[in-house]
Image (cartoon, rainbow, N blue to C red):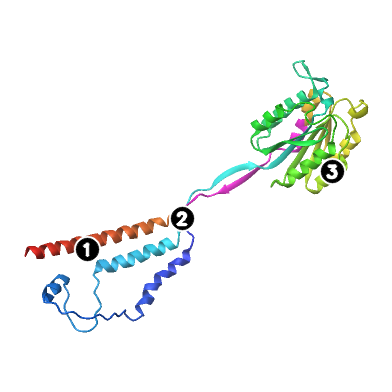
């Protein structure tokens, strides 16, 4: 399919008609007497006369001038070949995962389906690896937090890299404490820099907040203002005490004020169930982008006009050479 970017350019076709209304171009020249005037008349094939004269044009010249002007006008209209629509699907959701790396995550109280007992972080890694495989339509990001919150992976469509950086995390690399609220604050900052309107934050922690700059509930209220839904997963024994104690009240309120939900996982199966529930609440989302490829064809009429111009003048030069050669022979 061919479309014109500037169809109004075809009004320029009327310009030659307007030029006919103007007086002919006049140029005065000094006459020169030459002894071989008869030869010049014979070569030029023109009849000598007094006064001004308009050089005649043959039919080929008329056709060439008009056709070249048509080609230039068509080129000015900028024809484009427009291809069939091409659709692409892009990530429709930004999903940030915040993982607690405090010292209590090394507690080995999670049992895998094969009977092996692993620490809490290892159990989280296995479930998150499955999450990355199942969320092909989402852009994933990763925050780790302990005594401070750090960005491990910015939002990316490369889930293989995301999973690799997740596996490289270690207990204690972010400190031994738990800054729950600061992790939410860092996620808010990253979401504000993204273009997605669908924003989800999943937080996994096994302790209470021990020193955030902003209390977790206040941070969750700010997240809600930016349309960020927070899902919290409490890992570990709710009967624990001290810094490792689970503050279920805060965890529940953080999810409630942001429009999300909270879950409690005491073992591998409950952790898996929590992610399956989140997957049902936040199904895969795609944004379909459609565009039609365009290729400009303005060079084609320009090329045709140039080729015809060169052919016409080449033939004219060849004919003049032949006449000059035949004159010399005679």
Q: Residues at badges 1 and 2 in contact (C-beta under 8 Å)?
A: no
For this orientation, the residue located farthest to the bottom is 51
Is the residue 16 above or below the residue 320 in the image?
A: below
Label drawn at residue 316 = 1
First in sequence, mark 1 or 3: give its number. Answer: 3
Q: In the image, residue 80 lies at what x, y percent?
A: 46, 55
Please tell me whether residue 284 belongs to the stretch shown in magenta. yes
Q: Residues at badges 1 and 3 in contact (C-beta under 8 Å)?
A: no
**Which class describes the residues within 10 Å of circle 3: few (<14), some (14-19), or many (20+)?**
many
Label drawn at residue 80 = 2
First in sequence, mark 3 or 2: give its number. Answer: 2
Q: Which residues are magenta?
A: 275-295
Q: Helix, strand, or loop for circle 1?
A: helix
Q: In the image, residue 301 lies at what x, y percent?
A: 38, 58
Which of the two residues, 45 or 66, is positioned nearer the viewer here?
Answer: 45
Q: Which residue is mark 3?
A: 219
**Which class describes the residues within 10 Å of circle 2: few (<14), some (14-19), or many (20+)?**
some
Q: Helix, strand, or loop for circle 3?
A: helix
Residue 150, picture quadrant: top right
Q: Is residue 173 left or right of residue 161?
A: right
């Amino acid at each position: 399919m061919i479309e014109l970017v500037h169809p109004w350019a075809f009004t320029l076709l009327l310009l030659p008609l307007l030029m006919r209304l103007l007086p002919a171009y006049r140029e005065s020249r000094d006459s020169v007497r030459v002894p071989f005037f008869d030869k010049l008349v014979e070569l030029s094939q023109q009849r000598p006369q007094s006064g001004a004269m308009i050089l005649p044009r043959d039919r080929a010249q008329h056709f060439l001038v008009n056709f070249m002007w048509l080609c230039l006008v068509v080129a000015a209209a900028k024809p484009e070949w427009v291809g069939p629509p091409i659709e692409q699907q892009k990530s429709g959701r930004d999903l940030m995962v915040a993982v607690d790396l405090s010292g209590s995550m090394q507690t080995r109280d999670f049992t895998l389906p094969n009977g092996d007992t692993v620490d809490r972080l290892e159990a989280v890694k296995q479930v998150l690896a499955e999450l990355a495989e199942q969320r092909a339509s989402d852009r994933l990001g990763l925050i780790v937090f302990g005594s401070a919150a750090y960005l491990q992976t910015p939002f990316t469509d490369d889930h293989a890299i995301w999973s690799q950086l997740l596996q490289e995390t270690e207990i204690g690399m972010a400190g031994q404490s738990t800054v729950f609220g600061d992790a939410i604050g860092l996620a808010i900052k990253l979401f504000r820099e993204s273009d997605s309107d669908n924003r989800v934050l999943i937080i996994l922690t096994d302790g209470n907040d021990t020193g955030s700059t902003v209390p977790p509930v206040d941070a969750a209220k700010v997240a809600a203002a930016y349309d960020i839904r927070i899902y919290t997963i409490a890992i570990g024994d709710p009967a624990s005490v001290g810094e490792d104690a689970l503050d279920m009240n805060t965890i529940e309120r953080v999810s409630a004020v942001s429009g999300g939900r909270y879950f409690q996982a005491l073992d591998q199966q409950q952790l898996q169930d929590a992610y399956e529930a989140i997957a049902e609440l936040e199904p895969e989302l795609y944004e379909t982008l459609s565009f039609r490829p365009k290729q400009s064809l303005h060079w084609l009429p320009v090329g045709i006009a140039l080729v015809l111009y060169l052919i016409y003048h080449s033939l004219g030069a060849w004919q003049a050479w032949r006449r000059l050669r035949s004159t010399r022979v005679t």
